[in-house]
């Protein structure tokens, strides 16, 4: 069997790619990198503008001054500056991959020396990095030790599907602390990425250097992360993957450890739906955990260790997510995550899974179908990867086979009942309807939300999130009004509502729920139906008492015209006080009264609403990013029986 270093070198030399971006990124780090073990890493989600949600402009020479590229606001607070430290360290760790590509391409020793300098720095200083969680230092890990003892004694066991994340009685957080990074999640990812470069180039380290890296970095990191395993979550899965990978790198790996409490098998057993999707109901977090499992699989392949259950689980995961994508390659995007994601956003995950299991024809075909998809890759607002010439940097290193031709199979309607959504499909329309969640974690206020495409054009979508530290997330993106949903008296819904499927077939899904709202008893139903040339969505709300009922529908990146049929009157944001509207996400409101039908057009697209509403509000709102525009309609009535039907042709 060829050594991993030889295999990777052949992979690099056999590919044609533009290396300019790798040179620029690597040389920037070589020339500017400096670090100090006493610097605290912060939360990268704080590196977003508080006003407009834009990702701040990172500069290597500006650790104490962060600037919004959209509005120009300058930040000098601890949260933003500590987030700068995290980004700097992530750029340094990403440069390990880029430098490895350049080293294999050019044989220039400066790239190897840069790699060794960084890895040995973290080995030299790992013991000195303060234990901290985001911006708070921890004296020790006693609280995490105590919960581990309680778990071993059978006193506590946390169910990720129902827990409120308070961990009463224990001063712990599920994110867990970090040392190099601001939390245990980021620590695990950093260590895996350091470990990947080390594994490939291990023969380039001296015997003493190898012992130093393994003894002073990898082994203590294993013990540090083990203390933080107490629930099944995307964060704990990354930590568990890191624990097992570092075990492979230090010759302490045992396949039997997959059976550990909150270990790999526990996550596979309890954290996936029957359809193979991650329980948090987010396509971003689904691929996030798939990346962790793909890394683990790749390291196991390099060590000639195989686990059939892990392979089949990863295959099921990526098959499910590939099938969930709309026909245009764009993902429905419920719950937390990032905006506008598509299949190619996660190209690196499909590459890594395919490389980890080169003989798995299903994973190979999925990877090829993703590569051949015509959708343009949408980058994540936060990502530590470079994509060029049809590969990620990781793909350039690990892919060693030609892409097979795509097999274009028309996708059919799917009802992923355990994952709580359906996607209706025909030749003209794709419609996604969500009808619940499996956990509070990363869930949004979006009961019976819909997204749809017409002739592969995304007409209405979910905005997902900006960085969690941005106010816009809490005032707009994760709100009832921010979704295609139903609202009663301006109140939030019960996120863990129960729904019942009334009917489902290839062209219809009908759902109802009776526990959306705590203050008033209601029955809310929504039926989506595909006909040959039209899409129909019928929404009905029955309330036990008179209530202000709003049915909301957003349209994205499209201007709909009413051909001046209606009399709209501009009103102020105070017209809708229950929603605490702000001008940074609602730019204008018009209202129209005393009509029962609304006709809208855009070219050949025709949208008709029929309703018993009293007032219709038309809002000019922001998308995600906030530079995008949306057209939002609110159909309102004070009644006990509200009906709105939308027909799209």
Image (cartoon, rainbow, N blue to C red):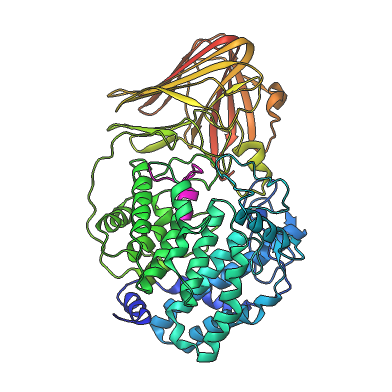
* Residue 5 locus on image (x, y percent): 38, 81
Toward the front, the furthest residue is: 153
Magenta span covers which residues? 275-289
**Above or below, 137 relative to 641:** below
**Above or below, 570 relative to 130:** above
Q: Residue at x 64, y 49 (%)?
A: 155
- Residue 381 visible in image: no
- Residue 90 visible in image: yes
User: Which quadrant would residue 62 be assigned to in this image?
Assistant: bottom right
Q: Verify whether residue 281 appears in magenta.
A: yes
* Residue 355 locus on image (x, y percent): 34, 65
User: Which quadrant would residue 392 be assigned to in this image?
Assistant: bottom left
**Above or below, 327 relative to 352:** above
Quadrant including the N terminus: bottom left
**Above or below, 402 relative to 447:** below
Quadrant including the C terminus: top left
Q: Is residue 117 left or right of residue 471?
A: left
* Residue 153 locus on image (x, y percent): 62, 54
Q: Residue at x 64, y 13 (%)?
A: 547
Q: Is residue 78 left or right of residue 12?
A: right
Q: Verify whether residue 200 appears in magenta.
A: no
Q: Residue at x 60, y 69 (%)?
A: 223
Tally of numbered tags? 0
* Residue 619 locus on image (x, y percent): 59, 27
Q: Nearer the viewer, residue 588 or 507?
A: 507
């Amino acid at each position: 069997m060829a050594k991993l270093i030889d295999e990777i070198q052949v992979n690099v030399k056999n590919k044609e790619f533009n290396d300019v971006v790798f040179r620029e990124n690597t040389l920037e780090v070589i020339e500017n990198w400096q670090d100090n073990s006493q610097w605290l890493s912060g939360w990268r989600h704080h590196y977003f503008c508080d006003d407009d949600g834009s990702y701040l402009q990172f500069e290597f020479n500006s650790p104490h001054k962060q600037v919004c590229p959209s509005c120009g606001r300058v930040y000098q607070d601890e949260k933003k500056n500590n987030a700068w430290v995290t980004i700097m360290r992530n750029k340094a760790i990403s440069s390990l991959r880029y430098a490895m590509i350049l080293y294999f391409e050019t044989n220039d020793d400066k790239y190897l020396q840069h790699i060794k300098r960084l890895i040995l720095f973290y080995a030299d200083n790992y013991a000195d990095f303060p234990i901290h969680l985001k911006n708070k230092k921890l004296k020790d890990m006693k609280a995490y030790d105590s919960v581990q003892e309680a778990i071993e004694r059978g006193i506590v066991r946390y169910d990720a599907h129902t827990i409120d994340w308070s961990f009463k009685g224990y001063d712990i957080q599920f994110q867990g602390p970090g040392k190099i990074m601001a939390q245990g999640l980021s620590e695990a990812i950093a260590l895996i990425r350091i470990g990947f470069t080390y594994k490939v180039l291990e023969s380039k380290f001296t015997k003493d250097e190898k012992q130093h890296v393994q003894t002073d970095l990898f082994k203590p990191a294993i013990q540090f992360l083990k203390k933080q395993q107490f629930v099944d979550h995307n964060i704990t899965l990354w930590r568990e993957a890191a624990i097992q990978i570092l075990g492979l790198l230090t010759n302490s790996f045992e396949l039997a450890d997959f059976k550990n409490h909150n270990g790999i098998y526990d996550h596979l057993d309890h954290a996936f739906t029957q359809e193979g999707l991650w329980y948090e109901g987010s396509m971003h977090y689904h691929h996030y955990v798939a990346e962790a499992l793909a890394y683990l699989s790749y390291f196991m392949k390099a060590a000639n260790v195989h686990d059939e259950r892990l392979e089949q689980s990863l295959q099921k995961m990526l098959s499910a997510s590939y099938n969930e994508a709309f026909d245009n390659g764009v993902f429905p995007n419920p719950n937390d995550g990032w905006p506008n994601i598509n299949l190619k956003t996660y190209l690196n995950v499909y590459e890594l899974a395919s490389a980890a299991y080169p003989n798995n024809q299903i994973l190979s075909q999925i990877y090829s179908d993703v590569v051949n998809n015509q959708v343009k890759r949408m980058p994540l607002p936060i990502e530590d990867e470079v994509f060029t010439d049809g590969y990620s940097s990781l793909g350039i290193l690990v892919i060693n086979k030609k892409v097979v031709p795509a097999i274009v199979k028309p996708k059919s309607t799917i009802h992923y009942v355990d994952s709580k959504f359906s996607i209706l499909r025909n030749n003209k329309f794709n419609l996604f309807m969500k009808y619940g969640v499996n956990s509070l974690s990363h869930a949004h206020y979006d009961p019976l939300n819909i997204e749809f495409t017409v002739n592969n054009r995304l007409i209405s979508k979910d905005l997902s999130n900006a960085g969690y530290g941005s106010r816009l997330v809490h005032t707009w993106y994760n709100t009832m009004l921010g979704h295609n949903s139903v609202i009663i008296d301006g109140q939030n819904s019960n996120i863990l509502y129960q729904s019942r499927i009334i009917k489902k077939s290839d062209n219809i899904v009908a759902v109802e729920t009776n526990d959306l709202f705590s203050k008033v008893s209601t029955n809310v139903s929504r039926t989506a139906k595909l006909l040959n040339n039209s899409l129909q969505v019928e929404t009905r709300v029955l309330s036990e008492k008179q209530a202000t009922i709003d049915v909301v529908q957003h349209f994205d990146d499209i201007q709909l015209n009413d051909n001046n049929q209606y009399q709209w009157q501009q009103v102020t944001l105070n017209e809708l006080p229950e929603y605490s509207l702000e001008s940074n996400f609602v730019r204008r409101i018009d209202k129209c009264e005393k009509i029962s039908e609304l006709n809208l057009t855009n070219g050949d697209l025709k949208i008709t609403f029929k309703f018993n509403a009293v007032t219709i509000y038309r809002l000019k709102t922001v998308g995600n990013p906030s530079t995008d525009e949306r057209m939002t309609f609110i159909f309102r009535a004070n009644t006990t029986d509200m009906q709105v039907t939308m027909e799209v042709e």
